[in-house]
Amino acid sequence: MTGYFLTLEGIDGCGKSTHARRVADALTDAGREVVLTREPGATDLGQKLRKALLETEGPVSDVAEVLGFAADRAQHVDEVIRPALGRGEVVISDRFADSTRAYQGSGRGVDREMLERAIELATGGLSPDLTILIDVDLAVARERSAETASDRLERESDAFFECVREGFLELGRREPHRISTIDGSGSLEETAAAVLATVHERLPDLIRSA
Ligand code: TYD
């Protein structure tokens, strides 16, 4: 059986983690072996990098930030994602390289070519079969994430997150075959239904061969 690689993306508070879990449950129910994972922090090294990336109080340069997320991704791909795909499993990752493009590229303004080089190095060219982008406006996202403790990135300004959101939407427009953009402003159930419908539509084999 062929492995499939699905990613969920969006700004903090968009609800992607909840939907990643829902998709994982649905595919498990359909009989597939599913690995639900996330960035940053899916591995032992990744946990340490996550803490460094999100909890460092002192300055973090833009390049250090790019390379930190890239190091986390390199370990994630090597230790978790490629082995699972090799076993024919479905890998669902809560964030992947598009987060670097949106946060470090559109948010921080890091040079695109440099970002793509770091992404290529980390992934060895591995790209998702399908990416689901959950789009919500900033007010909705802020309301949803209001109760969770805020980390270094979550403390960024509204202007930063507007750029990140626009960056994600631009990626969706540029790569419509890979990225499916879903409006996440409705109820949890409405969005979950839209996400599952997209998975069925884009990857029918995923269900048929289950
Ligand atoms: P996430 O785990 O989604 O946050 P939380 O657990 O608080 O819901 O992501 C952590 C943060 O890392 C998030 O603000 C986005 C950021 N991030 C980047 O800036 N670049 C990246 O490449 C990745 C993977 C995440």
Image: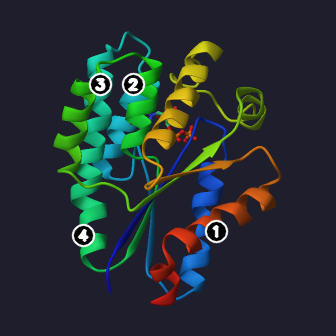
78 with respect to 177 (left or right): left
Q: Amino acid at mark 3?
A: Arg
Taking the view exactly as shown, the residue that stands out farthest to the right is 187
Foreground of the two, 180 or 12: 180
The residue sitting at 42% across, 17% down in the picture is: 108
Query: Mark 2 = which residue?
Result: 104
* 198 is higher (above) or lower (below) than 200: above
Residue 138 image position (x, y, % from top left): 70, 27
Residue 125 image position (x, y, % from top left): 20, 51
* Cα–Cα gap, marks 2 and 3: 9 Å
**In terms of secondary structure, where does tag 3 sit?**
helix
Determine whether the beta carbon of the residue marked 2 sits less than 8 angstroms from the nearest atom of ligand 1: yes
The crowd level at tag 3 (other Cα within 10 Å; few <14, some 14-19, many 20+) is few
Circle 1/circle 3 CB separation < 8 Å: no
Residue 186 image position (x, y, % from top left): 81, 49
The answer to which of marks 4 and 2 sits earlier in the sequence is 4
* Cα–Cα gap, marks 4 and 2: 28 Å
Query: Mark 1 = which residue?
Result: 196
Q: Which mark is residue 83?
A: 4
Q: Amino acid at mark 4?
A: Pro
Circle 2/circle 3 CB separation < 8 Å: no
The answer to which of marks 4 and 1 sits earlier in the sequence is 4
Foreground of the two, 136 or 12: 136
Which of the two marks, 2 or 3, is nearer to us in this view? Answer: 3
